[in-house]
């Protein structure tokens, strides 16, 4: 992509829990000649991958160092606690962090939540990954608090989850290196437009330029249409006054006006 002779392509990284299927489908419809390659990456490594040029853009979890990366926040996830299906937590629709005070709450090394004070009791060891922590929850070792998308990603029939009302939330953003070649920047802009829901004609505003001119061309026609009723109102005013005079003379209309003319001649 750094050479003008190279065929264009687009590399999109994404962290666990993000499902880019919809955006990839739209990309393939709009840019069928530009292949898009998906690159799964751990949340902790996503920003480094972008900085090193391993991907053109990526779905990451905030925060992002804006020194050399741009980012557009997309959505905020609900935070949930993953528990065995027979756990007491399943009796309620939602819990607070303090409700987990007597529980062992696992804290995997790839945790994406930023806690000021973590809930529950710490385990003897931290699981290496969220997937490992899920296995421990299934074994009855403890509970796990994660973004809802990760709970769904690691779904098991013997586990369920409930929202945690006062837990920190994880925000997902689209990020990309700020220093890009011209070719890559165009592709990133196209993908930004797709993610933001722009139509194929509105991307970067290139196809919208004629619209204002067309709108101006229609204004004189609309104004002309308004002037015709205005002229009618002007013509109607004398008629109204004539009718008013007739009403005062008791004749009630134009016939009284015709009867009055012969009287003035005599």
Image (spheres, rainbow, N blue to C red):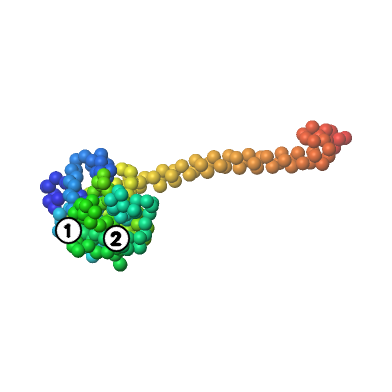
Q: Position of residue 124 (x, y in %)?
A: 19, 63
Question: Is residue 121 visible to the viewer in this orientation of the structure?
Answer: yes
Q: Which residue is mark 2?
A: 103
Q: Secondary structure at mark 2?
A: loop
Please, is residue 227 above or below residue 185 in the view? Answer: above
> At 12% from the left edge and 47% from the top edge, which residue is drawn?
6
Q: Is residue 245 left or right of residue 155?
A: right
Q: Which residue is mark 1?
A: 128
Q: Which numbered tag is attached to residue 41?
A: none
Q: Position of residue 181 (x, y in %)?
A: 18, 55
Q: Is residue 254 left or right of residue 228?
A: right
Q: Residues within 10 Å of mark 2 (few under 14, many from 20)?
A: some
> At 25% from the left edge and 57% from the top edge, which residue is drawn?
142
Q: Residues within 10 Å of mark 1 (few under 14, many from 20)?
A: few
Q: Residue furthest right?
A: 266
> At 74% from the left edge and 42% from the top edge, which residue is drawn?
241
Rendering quarter of residue 133: bottom left
Q: Residue furthest bottom?
A: 116
Q: Position of residue 71 (x, y in %)?
A: 27, 58
Task: Indicate which label's residue lies in the foreground, 1 or 2.
Answer: 2
Q: Quadrant of the C terminus?
A: top right
Q: Please tell me which residue lies in front, 258 or 1.
A: 1
Disc tally is 2
Q: Please tell me which residue lies in front, 56 or 59.
A: 59
Distance, label 1 to label 2, CA atoms, is 20 Å
> At 23% from the left edge and 49% from the top edge, which residue is drawn?
154
Q: Secondary structure at mark 1?
A: loop
Q: Please tell me which residue lies in front, 263 or 185.
A: 185
- Mark 1 vs 2: CB contact within 8 A: no
Q: Position of residue 86 (x, y in %)?
A: 30, 49
Q: Is residue 209 left or right of residue 70?
A: right
Q: Please tell me which residue lies in front, 43 or 55.
A: 43
């Amino acid at each position: 992509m750094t050479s003008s002779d190279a065929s264009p392509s687009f590399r999109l990284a994404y962290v666990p829990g993000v499902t880019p299927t919809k955006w990839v489908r739209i990309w393939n419809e709009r840019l069928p000649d530009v292949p898009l390659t998906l690159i799964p990456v751990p949340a902790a490594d996503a920003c480094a991958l972008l900085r090193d040029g391993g991907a053109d853009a990526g779905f990451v979890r905030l925060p992002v160092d804006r020194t050399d990366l741009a980012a557009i926040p997309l959505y905020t996830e609900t935070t949930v606690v993953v528990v065995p299906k027979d756990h007491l937590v399943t009796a309620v629709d939602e819990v607070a962090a303090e409700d987990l005070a007597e529980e062992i709450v696992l804290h995997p090394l790839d945790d994406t939540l930023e806690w000021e004070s973590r809930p529950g009791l710490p385990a003897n060891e931290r699981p290496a990954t969220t997937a490992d922590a899920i296995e421990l929850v299934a074994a009855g070792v403890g509970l796990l608090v994660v973004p809802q998308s990760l709970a769904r990603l690691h779904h098991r029939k013997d586990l369920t989850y409930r929202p945690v009302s006062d837990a920190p939330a994880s925000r997902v953003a689209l990020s990309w290196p700020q220093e890009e070649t011209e070719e890559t920047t165009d592709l990133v802009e196209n993908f930004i437009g797709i993610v933001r829901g722009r139509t194929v004609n509105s991307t970067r505003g290139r196809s919208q330029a004629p619209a204002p001119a067309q709108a101006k061309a229609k204004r004189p026609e609309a104004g002309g249409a308004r002037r015709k009723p205005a002229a009618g109102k002007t013509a109607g005013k004398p008629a109204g006054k004539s009718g008013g005079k007739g009403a005062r003379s008791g004749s009630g209309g134009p016939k009284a006006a015709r009867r009055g003319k012969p009287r003035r001649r005599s």
